[in-house]
Image (cartoon, grey):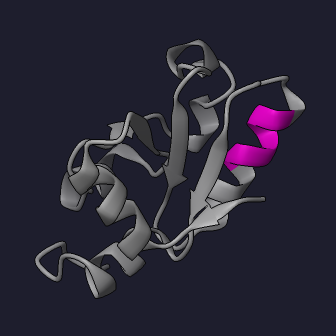
Amino acid sequence: MQEITATELNELLKSGADIQLIDVRQPAEYNFARIPGARLIPLGEIINRMGEIDPTRETIIHCKMGGRSAQAIHALERSGFQGKLRNLRGGITAWSNEVDPSVPKY
C-alpha cells in the first residue's frame, strides 16, 4: 500500500495538486477535528459510496492513526476501484503533530 506523510500531503495541498482527500472516521470525529478540504465517507459506507470517489484523481485516505484508512483502501481495491489510493501515515494525529498543531488530538 502506498503511503504519504502529513508533511508531503501538506505540500501537495499547498501546490494546488488535483487530489481528493477522504476521511473515513465517524461523523463525531470529523466534527471534532478535520483536515481542511477532507470529505467524510465513514469506513462502513466506503464501498456503497465508492462512486463518489473520482478514479481519475489521486485519492488520499485518512483516519485517526492510519488503520481504518488502510482497511478502506483494501476494501476499495478488492471492490475493483481503479484509481490511485494512498494512505496518510499516522492519520490526522500525524497532521496535528507535523503540520497543524491547532487540530485537536483525541
Q: Residue at x 59, y 42 (%)?
A: 43
Image check: 20 left or right of 103? right
Q: Is residue 39 left or right of residue 66?
A: left
Residue 76 belongs to magenta span = yes
Q: Is residue 36 depicted above or below 2 in this figure?
A: above
Furthest toward the right, the residue is 78
Q: Residue at x 30, y 87 (%)?
A: 97
Q: Is residue 16 shown in magenta?
A: no
Secondary structure predominantly adopted by residues drawn in magenta:
helix
- 83 to 56, vertically: above or below: below
- Name the one closer to the observer, 19 or 62: 19
Q: Is residue 52 above or below residue 78?
A: above
Q: Position of residue 102 (x, y in %)?
A: 11, 77
| Quarter of the picture holding the N terminus | bottom right
Residue in the image at 76% along x and 25% along y:
81
- Residue plotted at (31% across, 84% down): 98
User: Which quadrant does the C terminus fall into?
Assistant: bottom left
Extreme residue in the front direction: 15
Whole-percent x and y of residue 34? 25, 56
Apparent side of residue 96 relative to residue 26 in the rendered image (left or right) = left
Q: Which residue is at the front of the view, 64 or 53? A: 53
Q: Looking at the image, which residue sits at the far top?
A: 51
**Can you give x and y, in whole percent of width and height, for residue 28 in the image?**
30, 51
Spot the residue most to the bottom.
97
**Residue 45 location, x and y as percent?**
59, 29
Number of numbered tags placed on the structure image: 0
Q: Which residue range is magenta in the image?
A: 72-77
Q: Is residue 39 left or right of residue 42?
A: left
